[in-house]
Amino acid sequence: MKESSSVHYIYHALVGTSPLAVSNAIVWFFRKHPEIQVDEIRFIVSEPQSSEEKGTKHFIGTIVDLLKEDASELLDPNPLDQGTTIKDKDPIEVPEADLPRAISIISQKLKDVDSSKGFIMDLTAGRKAMGNALLCVGIHASGRWKRPVKFHYYLLKKFSREMMSKRATELSSDDVESYLFDVEDINAAFSQASSGTTSRFTGRS
């Protein structure tokens, strides 16, 4: 079932140096959260830091190949066959270590996107500054732009080199966690801190 609010989302995936981490996070997001309607998947990459470096844009082709193959095997129905499109051209390029500039670049790219669409911000892969920038933009988009925003984080329950090398189709539901939370969850965490209480976050699947 799709989310009853019928909100349609654009999924933003950070691209670091591990294509598998990106594709696995996306595939397992769809497997664990089939109620979320995603219209597009877009990528945020690291820009080259010097003339000798490539950045991470060149990994997108591998990510898309992995994503299509594993989604066709693991997802039924497969969102990629039902209207979800992959925007693999013209990704958002951000610096790896300049947090304010990364926030500015992502904000400029997202602020004029169809206002009827919400944002899924996948914080799994990419460099730390990229993830921090996407989190900041997501909070801003929710508060100032009044956009529906959800944050996603995928991780392996058992962290090992062997598990990290497995494709989505080689993993089971018992191997992975897929956390989905929104700005209200963040606000609640601050409220709990102010009151001196804590509770375990339950937005996982």
Image (spheres, rainbow, N blue to C red):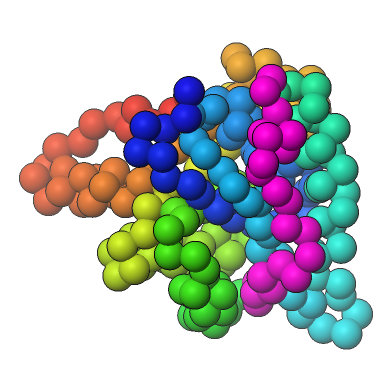
Say if 193 sits above or below 165 in the image. below
Left-right relation of 62 to 79? right
Q: Position of residue 177 (x, y in %)?
A: 54, 27
> At which x and y percent is residue 131?
55, 59
Picture coordinates of residue 87 (x, y %)? 73, 57
- Residue at horizontal 50 percent and vertical 43 percent from the top: 152
Total residue callouts? 0
Is residue 24 visible in this depiction of the protein?
A: no
Q: Can you say whether 176 is above or below 142 in the image?
A: above
Q: As drawn, is 189 to the left or to the right of 48? A: left
Of all residues, the one furthest to the left in this rendering is 195
Question: What segment is highlighted magenta in the picture?
Answer: 76-96
Residue 109 drawn at (x, y percent):
56, 75
Q: In the figure, 50 relative to 130: above or below?
A: below
Residue drawn at x 37%, y 32% is 4
In the displayed structure, does residue 127 sit left or right of residue 168? left
Q: Residue at x 78, y 59 (%)?
A: 88
Q: Residue furthest right?
A: 52
4 vs 141, nearest the viewer: 4
Picture residue at 85% right of the left edge, 32% below the top: 69
Q: Is residue 161 above or below residue 105?
A: above
The quarter holding residue 145 reads bottom left
Res 205 seen here: yes
In-front residue for pair 19/27: 27
- Residue 59, quarter of picture: bottom right
Task: Tell me if 80 is positioned left or right of 124 in this view.
Answer: right
92 in magenta: yes
